[in-house]
Image: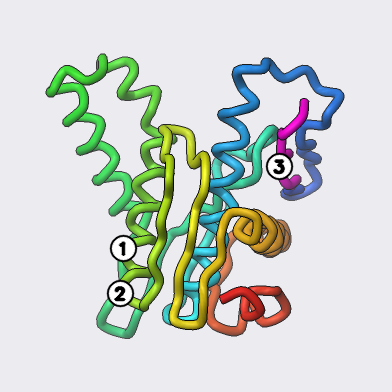
Amino acid sequence: MSGLTLGNTIHFSSEVHKSATVDDEIPRFKVRQINAMNYQADLQAIYIALLARHCTITIGRPHRLSHLTKQFIKIKKIVFSNLDSIDVLQFIQTRSNEQAQHEYKTGNTTQKTAKRRIQPTKRREEMRFLQDILFEFGYYVEISSETIDGYEGSVSLYSKKGSITTNSIRLLGDELNKKLSSILEAQPNALLNSSSFKETSLDSFL
């Protein structure tokens, strides 16, 4: 299975959740989907780490653990100040439902398909939401190809300090995703801030 990037494993409580190995039989049509989702998870981890420089982020354990892909982190709340915060779960739920209804009403998809796509739609809407916030803090993202499952092709992320592209994003994103997964292995919910990623390579890249 060349080109397949496997997910990080998270162990919650005493239950062991195993990620896929190269020996597992994965249909070929799934390889592209898995890689796109892993790429998305890498980029999400970078977004979270960058935002933590400017605000406090609450993350939590997911209801469903990923077995074949890297874990997409559940963001619950972002606090900018005592008077400014966002309930991310509620915001993304509303936004995703509106998107699903729009696609169904305009005839772009069936109601059954729209419901089936709700989880990937939530991930996509969250990524766009995070990109909008990052833009306000001076970060800009260029994505060559976005699919319902994640990202393909080249991605570039720019900041005042510099920029990183595809290979560096995968490298840094994998490190940060493992960091976040490790945090959630130890506790069901966690608060992230500017000190949460000091022992990572983030500052070396951006």
Residue located 50% across and 82% down the image: 161
Could you tell me how far apart the alpha carbons at marks 1 and 3 are, in whole angstroms?
A: 27 Å
Disc 3 vs disc 2: Cβ atoms closer than 8 Å?
A: no
Drawn side of residue 93 relative to residue 188, left or right: left
Residue occupying the point 56% across, 29% down? 33
Q: Which quadrant holds residue 67? A: top right
Spatial distance from mark 1 to mark 2, Cα to Cα? 7 Å
Please tell me how crowded label 1 is: few (under 14), some (14-19), or many (20+) other residues with Cα within 10 Å: some
SS label for mark 2 = helix
Disc 1 to disc 2: CB gap under 8 Å: yes
Q: Is residue 60 above or below residue 78?
A: above
**Element at label 3:** loop
- Which residue lies under the disc numbered 3? 7
Vertical position of residue 30 compared to residue 182: above or below: above
**Would residue 171 be seen by someone viewing this image from the given angle?**
yes
Instruction: Give the prevailing secondary structure in the magenta stretch.
Output: loop
Which residue was labeled with disc 1?
132
